Amino acid sequence: MKRQVTETEKAKLISKYRQPDGFVHCFVDNEKIDTEKEIHFDHIEPFVKVEETSLDNIAPVCRNHNLAKKDMTLSEYRDKLQMENFFERFESAGKQAKLNDVLTFKYGNNFGFPIQYDFDSNQMKITVKYFQDKDKVHLPKIEAYQVYQCQITKMSYFYALVPAKNILNDGKEGEGLELQPRPLIPNHLWGLYRHLRVNTQLQPSICRVDGNVVLVFDGQHKAAAKIWAGADNIEAKIYIEPDVVWLMRTNLVAHDKLKQLRFYSSILADKMAQLYGVNWQRYVETTDKKSECQWTIKLTQ
């Protein structure tokens, strides 16, 4: 259910968003809205992310964009248009976009910063310095992590929230082994972007440390989706200087015959019905006043 904006609140929002040119600009494309009759209002972020839908989460939008966006929030629709334009540029040039291209879109050349690490194999601890510029002028962010070892391959790895500006896609075409050869798929990236804005990420992106860089070789869509949505860090499982040939072979097999299977439609329907039943029972047991409207709101939370 959408929040209804009162006339008093509309006046406050118009005053807040009025630009020096005297016009209110559309949140989606920052173009001026010629008349106040064309000004509509909607949520900036998915309102399940906040406890209350305050005016801070409401912004002006032009009539055309408000009708075109359908069930999307303003930030989602803005990002959708940007994403479409992003992929259209690559398609028109006969190229395919990868994670590094998303990083370039978001940060210009201000990414791919180096790291420096100290791995204590006796204590199974690793200390990582995340530098905040390419020339290591500024003091780095320093984090320490527990290290684990694969019992089969003896490869060492750790889990971390890695600053987005300290990652790169794993490999370039024609330059040695490319562990991440696949391009980004527009529909898959968009679907993950919307999903991860309001849901937890079940599996991290998989990376490796190679000298002073962190390279993403699996889960680039998840990383790209989080970065597109404004995340400053990505969730990662990071291998420490692994055997690249072994890792590449493992990764190829994992995306072939051993790729993750989807649920059958019948199983999905059954599990969704179970969730609906649990939510209904919880709603019935609350002391709140019951109504169809309140139940609909409950389902969106």
Image (cartoon, rainbow, N blue to C red):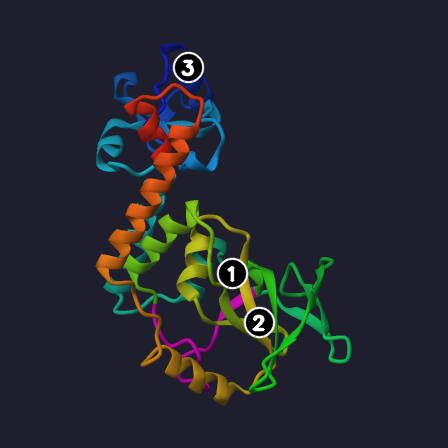
Start-end of magenta stretch: 167-183
Residue 98 in the image: state x and y as whole percent. Answer: 38, 67
Residue extending farthest top: 8
Q: Which mark is residue 238?
A: 2
Does 124 appear in magenta?
no
Work out which quarter of the rendered image holds the N terminus and state it: top left
As drawn, 181 above or below 227: below
The residue under the point 45% across, 29% down is: 57
What's the distance in space between the residues labelled 2 and 3, CA to CA? 48 Å
User: Residue 151 occupies which quadrant of the picture?
Assistant: bottom right
Could you classify mark 3 by the number of other residues whose Cα lies within 10 Å: few (under 14), some (14-19), or many (20 or more)? Answer: few
Q: Which mark is residue 41?
A: none
Residue 102 in the image: state x and y as whole percent. Answer: 42, 59
Whichever of callouts 2 and 3 sits on the residue coming sooner in the sequence is 3
Near-viewer residue (113 or 180) = 180
> Left or right: 60 with respect to 150?
left
What's the distance in space between the residues labelled 3 and 1, CA to CA? 41 Å
Residue extending farthest bottom: 245
* Three-letter code for the amino acid on which mark 2 is drawn: Ile
User: Which residue in the protein does label 1 denote?
Assistant: 109
User: Which residue in the protein does label 3 denote?
Assistant: 9
Residue 38 in the image: state x and y as whole percent. Answer: 26, 22
**Which callout, 2 or 1, points to the residue nearer the camera?**
2
